[in-house]
Image (cartoon, rainbow, N blue to C red):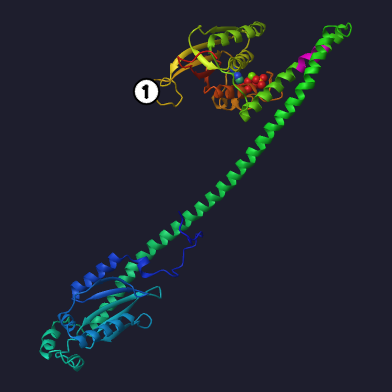
Amino acid sequence: MIPEGARASTEPPALGAVRLEDLVDREALGELAESLHALFGLSVRFFSSDGALLADRVTEQALCHHLQSVPGARAQCARTIDHVKRLVPDGAGSAAHPCFTGAEYLVVNVTYEQRRMGRAVLGPYLSPEIADPPPSLLLVDDQLDPADASRLLPAMPRLSRERAELIAAHVQSALDLILFSGHKAWLTSQMHLASVTESYRTLEDKNRRLADAVDRLRELDRLKSNFLATVSHELRTPLTSIIGYSEMLTEGMAGDLSAEQREYVGTIREKGEQLLSLIKSLLDLSKLESGTMALRKATLDVATVTEQVVSTLLPTARKRGVHLESSVPRGLARLHADGEKLRQVFLNLTENALKFTPSGGTVALSAALETSDAEDEGVGFVLGAEADERLVVRVADTGIGIPEAERARVFDAFYQVDSSSTREYGGTGLGLSIVKRLVEAHDGTIRIEGNTPTGAVFVVSLPTAPPSSSSS
Ligand SMILES: Nc1ncnc2c1ncn2[C@@H]1O[C@H](COP(=O)(O)OP(=O)(O)OP(=O)(O)O)[C@@H](O)[C@H]1O
Ligand SMILES: [Mg+2]
């Protein structure tokens, strides 16, 4: 928390309203008073500019103690002390104030950089020339025994005015040093405070702007998703008609077609289907982004999913001259998952693997059970807790592979490693972003590893179904 009124400038702050006690700690003042007392037997008090006592070292004089028991003397004593307390010498000087006992006090201004910061009061002390109690003491009250006054007065510390002023000068120069280092520390802390305040404000400002930008982006993202969903939906209906009518034309329902017409209609249908699958992907993505994709979960054997994927893609693999194999044993693991969506996941991954593997290569699906402590997912293994069992499915190919720096980005929508116009592989870059979201919707994770000597391995880790769960 930055104190109110803290300055945000990097200019050294002015001394302004700084008080003596801000620059020098009371302990240091106390030590100074102590040393003066030890050297000269002198009582010393330090006051701030507003009259508050900051430190002192005082020995009550036997005479003063005795005078407290004499009513007239006690009142006179209180008046003297009150005057001394309120006495402010001119400028950087000092002023002596006489006491009715014949002793005196010396009040010294404590100054720093021409500013009056506070006062030091030395005394009472008695001039060496005074041998007998003065009339002001003897006449202060009838009850005062002159013999007591004569006996106690000489015990006062003896000091001439000149010596007291020398001591005062010494106090001021000692305080100069103390105040200088205090001022330095104060400046440093003020500068530090100012720079912290400044960085805090800058940070706050940046945070505010970032939060605004995030809000704007969220709103844009929401608008984009709505737009995608609406447009995709509206495109699908006419497209279904285009595909349907081109199918009817191909089947000769509107009369025989020439070979050239058949070829054109075939292209219309093929491109229409490509467009339809793109629109379906966009719809899927927007549903996944908005969290409105419903999962129909049931307990299933992952092998049935991979078998379907392999049988769907075997013709494509043959056409491309790529060897497609699967070694996912039946009964290895049961998952509580949406079978259709899982099929979409492994279909996409295997299609990619086939697409990016040149003729003569291999695409292999495999699966294994792993416990979470063996999994490198940042999930800590808790001693004594039941290990979290995961099914890990790998789709490995011997194709062109994915450079390490690109592995996180390929899951972004529309991102393709080769985005040049001369790209030799088709597609729009939506497959993996849908895959990742589908896997995450199943509480799973997906990552990419390199294959040796070439190729990519997509590793999907999914939680297995608890033993009690049954098909729903
Ligand atoms: N098995 C793989 N080997 C090499 N690169 C891959 C592999 N799988 C994905 N990629 C890279 O990741 C990019 C994104 O993949 P993704 O499946 O999202 O899009 P796509 O296959 O290009 O298009 P779409 O799936 O939408 O038809 C690909 O363009 C490719 O650069
Ligand atoms: Mg793809």
Packing grade of label 1 (10 A; few <14, some 14-19, many >=20) is: few
Q: Nearer the viewer, residue 270 or 443?
A: 443
Q: Where 146 falls versus 377 (above or below)?
A: below
Magenta-span inclusion, residue 74: no
Q: Quadrant of residue 416?
A: top right
Name the residue beneath numbered marker 1: 385
Relative to the observer, which residue lies in front, 111 or 200?
200
Name which quarter of the figure residue 17 lies in.
bottom left
Q: Nearer the viewer, residue 135 or 77?
A: 77
Residue 309's place in the image compared with 107, above or below, is: above
Residue 300 placed where, x, y %? 54, 12
**In the rendered picture of this protein, how many numbered marks are placed on residues?**
1
Element type at marker 1?
Answer: loop
265 lies left or right of 299: right
Residue 432 visible from this viewpoint: yes
Magenta span: 265-272
Secondary structure mostly seen in the magenta stretch = helix
Give the image location of residue 466, x and y in percent: 46, 17
Which amino acid, mark 1? Answer: Ala
Q: Is residue 271 magenta?
A: yes
Give the residue drawn at x 12%, y 91%: 146
The image quadrant where one finds the C terminus is top right
